[in-house]
Image (cartoon, rainbow, N blue to C red):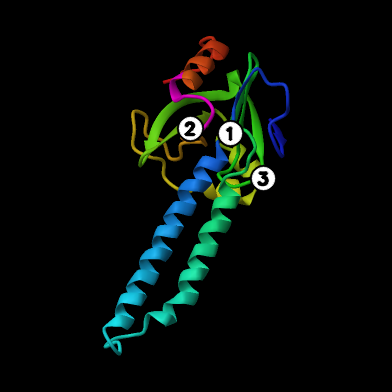
């Protein structure tokens, strides 16, 4: 097992996120929430003295929540590649947040399958060695304690996840490339 901070350059097939499009959607969501809040606050002032709690007291908690969402977005959406594959194996993020990518040879991969978390398509890569997560550190091990999504193959944990929504490659293109590079050495659904 090799671990790095980011996917090494020069891989034959690389999937990169479109962080700007994802950021625009999050900014639109935060803007809609803030706009709705200020609209409600403005309408409540027009009707005279408020009967209940004043909306002005909610500004600081709302701003703190927006700041938290922005920090979590920044952590979960680095501009680094999501996945890279070649004839010998693949690189995939070890955690959802920034930090590590891990190299898995095709012989060390138990299963690669697609799944949807809500509207988001993800690629789940399950290594044969389940003890790998303990060697990747505390946060990677904590990720494994969350049960995996229901799907064609129900596992205790889905393994490493690569989000495929808003990337520079289509989901079908990614799966086709993985099948081409794996050449039957691991099951790919």
- The residue positioned 54% from the left and 64% from the top of the image is 67
In the rendered image, is residue 3 in sight? yes
For marks 2 and 3, give the one nearer the viewer. Answer: 2
Tags 1 and 2 in contact by the CB under 8 Å rule? yes
In the rendered image, is residue 144 in sight? no
Where in the figure is residue 20, as x and y percent of width and height? Answer: 56, 42
Q: Nearer the viewer, residue 87 or 165?
A: 165
Tell me the quadrant of the picture where the N terminus can be found: top right
Where in the figure is residue 34, as x and y percent of width and height? Answer: 43, 65
SS assignment at label 3: loop
Q: Earlier in the sequence, mark 1 or mark 2?
A: 1
- The residue positioned 50% from the left and 69% from the top of the image is 63
C-alpha distance separating marks 3 and 1: 12 Å
What residue is pinned by disc 1?
82
Q: Quadrant of residue 127?
A: top right
In this image, 147 relative to 106: left or right?
left
What residue is pinned by disc 3?
99
C-alpha distance separating marks 1 and 2: 8 Å
Tags 3 and 1 in contact by the CB under 8 Å rule? no
SS assignment at label 1: loop
For marks 3 and 1, give the one nearer the viewer. Answer: 1
What segment is highlighted magenta in the picture?
A: 166-172
Where in the figure is residue 29, as x and y percent of width and height? Answer: 42, 54
Crowding at mark 3 (Cα within 10 Å: few <14, some 14-19, many 20+)? some
SS assignment at label 2: loop
Residue 164, disc: 2
């Amino acid at each position: 097992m090799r671990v790095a901070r980011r996917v090494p350059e020069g891989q034959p097939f690389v999937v990169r996120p479109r962080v700007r499009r994802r950021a625009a959607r999050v900014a639109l969501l935060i803007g809609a929430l803030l706009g709705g809040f200020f609209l409600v606050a403005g309408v409540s002032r027009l009707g005279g003295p408020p009967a209940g709690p004043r909306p002005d007291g909610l500004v600081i908690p709302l701003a703190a929540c927006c700041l938290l969402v922005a920090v979590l977005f920044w952590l979960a959406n680095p501009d680094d590649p999501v996945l890279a594959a070649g004839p010998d194996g693949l690189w995939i993020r070890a955690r959802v947040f920034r930090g590590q990518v891990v190299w898995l040879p095709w012989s060390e991969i138990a299963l690669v399958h697609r799944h949807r978390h809500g509207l988001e398509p993800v690629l789940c890569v399950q290594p044969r060695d389940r003890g790998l997560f303990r060697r990747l550190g505390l946060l990677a091990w904590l990720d494994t304690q969350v049960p995996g999504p229901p799907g064609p193959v129900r596992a205790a944990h889905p393994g490493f996840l690569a989000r495929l929504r808003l990337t520079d490659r289509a989901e079908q293109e990614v799966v086709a490339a993985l099948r081409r590079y794996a050449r039957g050495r691991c099951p790919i659904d």
